[in-house]
Image: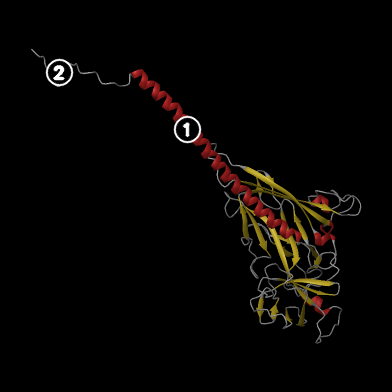
Amino acid sequence: MTTHYAGGVPGHRRHRQAGFTLVELLVSLAITTVIMGATMAALSQATRAAETATLMSNLNGGLRTAMDLIVRDMLQAGQGLPAGRVIQIPSGVGAQPIRLPGPPNTAFVLAGATQISAVIPGPGLGPVLNGQPTDIITTLQADSAFDQVRLTALPANGESMNVDPSVDLDDGTADDLHPGDLIMLTKGSLSALAQVTKVAGQHVSFDPGDSLNLNQPGAEQGTVKWIRNEPPGNPPGPFIAATATRIRMVSYYLDTATDPQRPRLVRRINNGHETSFDNTLGTAVAFNIESLQFTYDLADGVTNPANVRMVAADLNGTGRCAPNDCSPNQIRKLNVLLGGRSANRLSATQQFFRNSLVTQVSFRSLAFVDRYR
């Protein structure tokens, strides 16, 4: 008699199906967890490293770009200015202080001065960041595109000039003049600085009420009118001895008013408007800048002090040049410290990255004389 088993092969028992025991499953889960943990930790570190590299790269790139601009402008400071690298400004009877660019909500003037220097220090005049006052600097330089241009007329009232037709003022080239431009008039050892208010063909106006308060025909000295009429009794004639040179006034400072969360470094040319003095003008060249410090190396013929802040004590004879006064005319080198932070916080620590750049710039035009001008 043959025995049959349901669902099976005759004469054989059904074998039990193979599988994992609970211990094996737990061990495999533990190994998988360790591997995944190590993978996620490595991934987290890679993500953090990438985030760090991006934040630092953007921070350093912004600092380098800003420092390059500062160095470029400082190398040209004083270029093309008269002997002593100063320009005379309105002074004497009837003169009012001229205005100087600065951060928003400031109103700086150059009071009691008879001339403006190629370098105008502003120690501690910028906004305070992280408990540290920041600095301002303003420099003057001649624009070689409009340099020592002859004039065909310079009216005795000092409120305009006519430029020689050989220099076309509205042909779209670099020698065109525009409202807001600064013009230095020179005649012999005399100089004056004026601001263009209107341009019509070859006729350039210096109307009173300009934004920097340079056009003061009623002042005793340092004006276009004074240049035109010196020496006293100088009669009008076809030959105008004075020449005109365009001047660029370049200022650097920090602006914390526009966006307090992102302090920005501003580069400003002249005032930015011909009649309205507006300290909200200027071009932001870097963001998240927290420190802007300038010191100066001087040549006084005695001690030649370095790293001078040019604060009030230095200028009144009780500071680094004592017993003498330090003078902006003695400045030969500039030391710059530019500090900033990352645009965002590192997500893992919620902290900003910070870095700073330091450099020194030699004012070549303040140390050497151009024999070919």
Q: Residue at position x 69%, y 55% from top? A: 68
Q: Position of residue 208 (x, y in %)?
A: 70, 74
Q: Amino acid at mark 1?
A: Thr
Residue 26, placed above or below residue 345 = above
Which secondary structure lies at badge 2?
Answer: loop
Name the residue located 65 percent from the left edge and 73 percent from the top edge.
Answer: 179
Quadrant of residue 246 within the rendered picture: bottom right
The residue sitting at the front extreme is 1
Q: Is residue 139 left or right of residue 285?
A: right
Can residue 338 be seen here? The reply is yes
In the image, what residue occupies the spot 66% across and 82% down? 201
Q: Residue 151, percent across and down? A: 76, 81
Q: Which mark is residue 88?
A: none
Quadrant containing the C terminus is: bottom right
Query: Residue 139 versus residue 110: which sits nearer the camera?
Result: 139
Q: Residue beneath label 2, please? A: 10
Q: Secondary structure at mark 1?
A: helix
Q: Amino acid at mark 2?
A: Pro
Residue 244: x, y in percent? Answer: 76, 75
For the N terminus, give its image quadrant.
top left
Residues 354 and 95: in front is: 354
Dot 1 surroundings within 10 Å: few (below 14), some, or many (20 or more)?
Answer: few
Specify whether 274 is left or right of 299. left
Q: Which residue is mark 1?
A: 39
Residue 75 place in picture, x, y as percent: 76, 59
